[in-house]
Amino acid sequence: MTTPLNVLHVNIRSIRRNKRELMQLLLEKQTSIASINETFLRTNTRFRIPGFNILRKDRPEGCRGGVALLLKEGIEYSEAVFDLTKEELNNNEYTAAKVLLNGHAALLIATIYCPPKTTPSGKLITALADNNGHTIIMGDFNAKHTDFNCNTTNHSGKVLRDILHNTNLAILNTNEPTHIHSSTSKADILDLVLCSPDLSAKLLSFSVSHDVGSDHLPVLASFSLQLQQAPAKPRYNYKKANWEKYRKCIADKITNIAVTTQNPKDLDQLAERIGSILIQAREETIPLTTTKPPQQQLPAHILSLIKQKRKVRRDFIKTRAPMLKTEVNRLQNQIRYQLTLHKQKQWTAFYHQLDADTNPRTFWQKIKTINGDKTNNIIPVLKSQGQLIEDNKTKAILFRNHLQNVHSCPNDPLFDKDWKIIVDREMQKTVYPSNLTPVDHPLNRSVTIEEIKSHLKKTKNKAPGEDNIDSTLIKQAPDEYLHLLSNLFTTCLMEGYFPLPWKSAVVTMIHKPGKDPYNVTSYRPISLLSHVGKLFERVLTQRLSSHAEEMGLLGIHQAGFRKARSTTDNILRLSEDILRNFKKKEHTLAVFFDIEKAFDKMWHNGLCYRLADSNLQIPLSIRNIITSFLHNRTIKVKVSTAISSPFTPEAGVPQGAVLSPLLFLLYISDIYYPPPTIGQVSQFADDLCYWTSSKCPKLAAKKLQKSIEEIETWSNMWRVKLNPQKTQCVLFTRSTRKNKKPIDLKLYGEAIKVEKEAKFLGVTFQKNMNWTSHIANIEREGRKRLNHLKTLCGRKCGASPQTVLKVYISYIRSLFEYALPAWITASPRQMNRLQRIQNLAVKMAYRLPKYISNHHVHSISGLASISSRQSIIGQRFMNRAARNPSLRKAVEQARWTTDTPMSIMLKLS
């Protein structure tokens, strides 16, 4: 017996207020898709209903109106968008989705809300009706016509009747009213279900259901249609795993496997076989489980009240007796009161769990649940070359083509073509000898079980790659298996070869917040790679990183992805230098460079050529394994269940790979650094800043221009594209006089914009270094996060003060303390703006009124003030700075200066 397609529509008049009754109705009616009008949601309001994906369009102004489609999880759908002007829509609000039916036919389902005093949009309804397939349109049209079984006819009803006549859409409504006027108790039909003629023959039933707290009644239609749903994906239940049997199973399967091969193809097969052993052992020893959809049934006493209200409502519709209307209102208020108590009880239980949770991972998962931070991986309609892309397969192809273009060989008319020919010719000589003689070098030493176990301890349980092997399976494997892995890793090292199965990536696209969701460039890729391959990458990364640090291969001012280094180092160096120059009555001119797609466009042959430099002392086997690691990789893009064909990237470091950041640092390790007499440098990965100082801004610009020309030469040689449009410069000065001659710096012949402030590594630098803008930005974000904290601080139910403060420290105070040593010179008045936010957070945690003394509250909580935290962080930083070669000189200079970050922190320590 097949389950029919049940669709529901209701004008709910506040989906948040009536959420629980709606959820109960969706459960009772086994609803697949629900159309909701008048959601009353604001654009920044987080909202979800368990078990459903939500496609919503909120009214941009005010808090009324709004429409949404609820689609049961597992239903394959894509948003349907129509290119209509505001005038053509005529203030009609709509959202639509295309879902697949069994047999691959498409169903277009839409919800429309036509506010009072407006008429239904003929352009919109016609566009929906012209769909080449089945169509269902549901909504509150505020249109009355006797042809629709309404009591009267209005202008909107006449307009809608003409539209239906021209489109051949059928009305499924019977003579049952869908709206009971709250004051006059008059009943009429305002909520309509329209469908294409072919669907009317597949209608099984149509009914008006029980109310859910609104003066509109839900309408339910059932069709003899089958949706194409993604089957519930079974998961392995590791909590019920028999790990002893698992380890024994693996030990039995690897008895006859020996790593003796020196052939790349054999290494590929061995890598696949070693992975398949884990998969086979998992299938034999770990049970499968299927995630069941949430069944949030209400308590019996609330269900009893709802049933009683429904009965009285039915009697009222028949008789229109005022006493029954009063009883309906009384029962509705009682239901809302009981639902509030039930919700408080649930929250109380949740907060008790939160207070008792000592696991950081599960603790923060619960915090995200409170804030409604659930990632929606549904890709909406994409726009490409004036076309609307709706089906997932085409979206996957579109993303694939975009990524292939991103990872194409870097090219620009300014790049040094002769140098590229030389490098490419040299790289063609590189061979992969099958019997590479091991060089007595620390990088070539055999991989041990202890080394593998050490890396496994630091490995997080993240999503598996294409081989479907997660890190838990490797961690639980017996020593015999790890010994086999160590032999395979060692052989790969000796052969200078990275196996193909570890180079296949499956990419999912994640929307960048604040970007146009219809543009393919508004998404960033997340690559899922083999955990076995990533384990080998960890071995290579640790060895190569240690070698690079010992040999001083990375730039002294490069702070990215290095131990005991942070963004604070470089932010502080810039801040310290500017303020010290102020003391000398000098101006500081700084240029903040923007590098286009630095990681995505890294020149493969350029890196391999650089690593061959004898001064780097990297053995041939390691150079070959890095070349093998970069070449012949494949990337597939996955959108829902659709997967694109693979492509091989021509440039860039692999996204998501452990080894990638280090390879990028090695690639740009000889980037031009101006001599100390000319200028200074701050660098964090691809974030780069040059600055110089002088009593004369013109002289400072002249010195800096020479450095810019040098980095132009370097970038053209190594095919790194600097973006003149996004590169900025700031003249830091305390002088209020205007320069007679403006700063004239050029990059690739284009003038660099002169700004009053610039953001570098997340900190806003103003030309007068008073930190007003930076602290205003922090304060704005801090108050925004404080609103999230309020959800934990209910007076009737909420988390304990200790739990609230724990969240405050990690979520809000960390914002105040980012790079604090660099802007420790901010005035007490400015820092007090942040202290006020902490005061509010502490009072919220203890549920105290705002007029209570701040000193009293802090003495209860034991929380240090912002000024005290400044001292603590300053002391910690100075203890570390003394061991940092890039800061050692600044520490010494700070002993003879005042009012700079370093000098202030020296006094504190």
Image (cartoon, grey):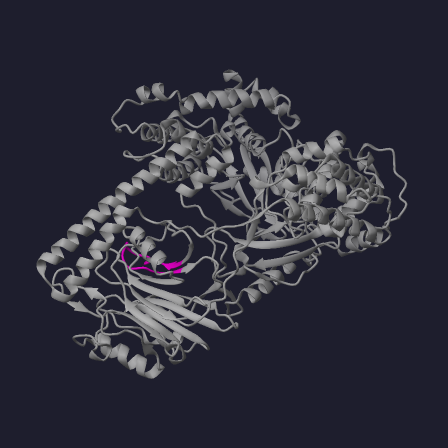
177 relative to 290 in the view: left or right: left
Q: Residue furthest left?
A: 322
Q: Is residue 97 above or below residue 771?
A: below
Q: Quadrant of the N terminus?
A: bottom left
x and y, in percent, of residue 520 in the image:
54, 60
Q: Is residue 146 above or below residue 57?
A: below
Name the residue rendered at 29%, 29% in the picture: 847
Tell me if residue 62 is in the magenta stretch.
Answer: yes
Tell me if residue 108 is in the magenta stretch.
Answer: no
Name the residue rendered at 13%, 63% in the picture: 185
Work out whether residue 678 can be spotted. no
Q: Is residue 239 above or below residue 506?
A: above
Magenta range: 55-70
**Relative to the observer, which residue lies in front, 709 or 391?**
391
138 relative to 443 in the view: left or right: left
**Relative to the observer, which residue lies in front, 767 or 609?**
609
x and y, in percent, of residue 877 in the image:
55, 23
**Relative to the observer, which residue lies in front, 122 or 51?**
51
360 relative to 138 in the view: left or right: right
**Relative to the observer, which residue lies in front, 522 or 725?**
522
x and y, in percent, of residue 750 in the image:
59, 53
Work out whether residue 894 can be spotted. yes
x and y, in percent, of residue 86 in the image:
34, 68
